[in-house]
Amino acid sequence: MANTYTLISSVTVGSGGASSIDFTSIPATYTDLLVKMSTRAVATSNFPNTRVRFNSDSGSNYTYRRLYGTGVAAGSDTATETGAMIANTNGSDSTANTFAITDFYIPNYLSSNQKAIGAETASENNGTTAYIFAMADIWTGTTAITSMSIYSDYNFAQYSTAYLYGISNA
Amino acid sequence: MTNKIIVDCSTGVTTEVELTAEEIAEREAMAAEYAVQKAQEEAEATAKAAAKESANAKLAALGLTAEEIAALTK
């Protein structure tokens, strides 16, 4: 069980938006990593996908299992892609100034084995459609994670935020 | 195309960097793929709703009450 949380770095997207949020030179001094995000995308439709890549690996080395609920329906899906699915982000169809809330957790990010990622996200929307997602991802990379790039199908809007925490188990 | 934000965790320095041509092409392809995916989902939802409405109308035409139809379909 984690007993320390240390903020490593954080980002707030400025007025120009951002195509991705990248954390580089992640220190190798923790046990696990946790990212907490509040994001909205500049999208013409709702809830575009948000993914993360590690160590600039853009190969088809990420697989997700996803459960989702819309408020009126539920489902699940799976796919292998070029980034790990971690969120679905509010878009321009969402209520103005609402953001999706996301956490994703990477245990043993220094491991020489493939990495698991647990993610959950909920949209904030004053409408009939609001999503909740729970995802289990795996990245087949066997090197320690030193960088990550978080990106969406569309650019992140102003005031989107991401906080990267290092967690030590002892 | 909007820049990407890079945070160097060892220094805390944040920089904004323009995307490469390859990255721009990838993002445009992702957005296009997502638009197609959403259109398919919306078309499927519309078709499903129409089929449900049609089925309910046929059941009503057979003489089933709204309560009986609800009991069958939920």
Image (cartoon, rainbow, N blue to C red):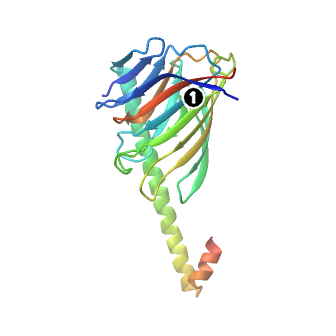
Which quarter of the figure has residue A165?
top right
Q: Which amino acid type is shown beneath numbered disc 1?
A: Leu
Q: Tag 1, which chain? A: A
Compared to A112, does A61 lie above or below?
Answer: below
Q: Position of residue A19 (x, y in %)?
A: 38, 29
Residue under the image location 55 percent in, 14 percent down: A27
Which quarter of the figure has residue B65?
bottom right
Total marks shown come to: 1
Residue under the image location 48 percent in, 12 percent down: B10
Q: Is residue A93 left or right of residue B67?
A: left
Does residue B24 show up?
Answer: yes
Q: Position of residue A46 (x, y in %)?
A: 41, 47
Compared to A99, does A35 lie above or below?
Answer: above
Does residue A88 show up?
Answer: no
The answer to which of A170 and A41 lies nearer the viewer is A170
Residue under the image location 44 percent in, 11 percent down: B11
Q: Position of residue B39 (x, y in %)?
A: 42, 50
The answer to which of B35 and A23 lies nearer the viewer is A23
Q: Is residue A28 left or right of residue A123?
A: right
Quarter of the image with the C terminus of chain A in it: top right
Q: Position of residue A141 (x, y in %)?
A: 62, 20
Q: Which residue carries the number 1 mark?
A: A34
Which quarter of the figure has residue A28?
top right
Density class for disc 1 (Cα within 10 Å; few <14, some 14-19, many ≥20) is many
Quarter of the image with the N terminus of chain A in it: top right
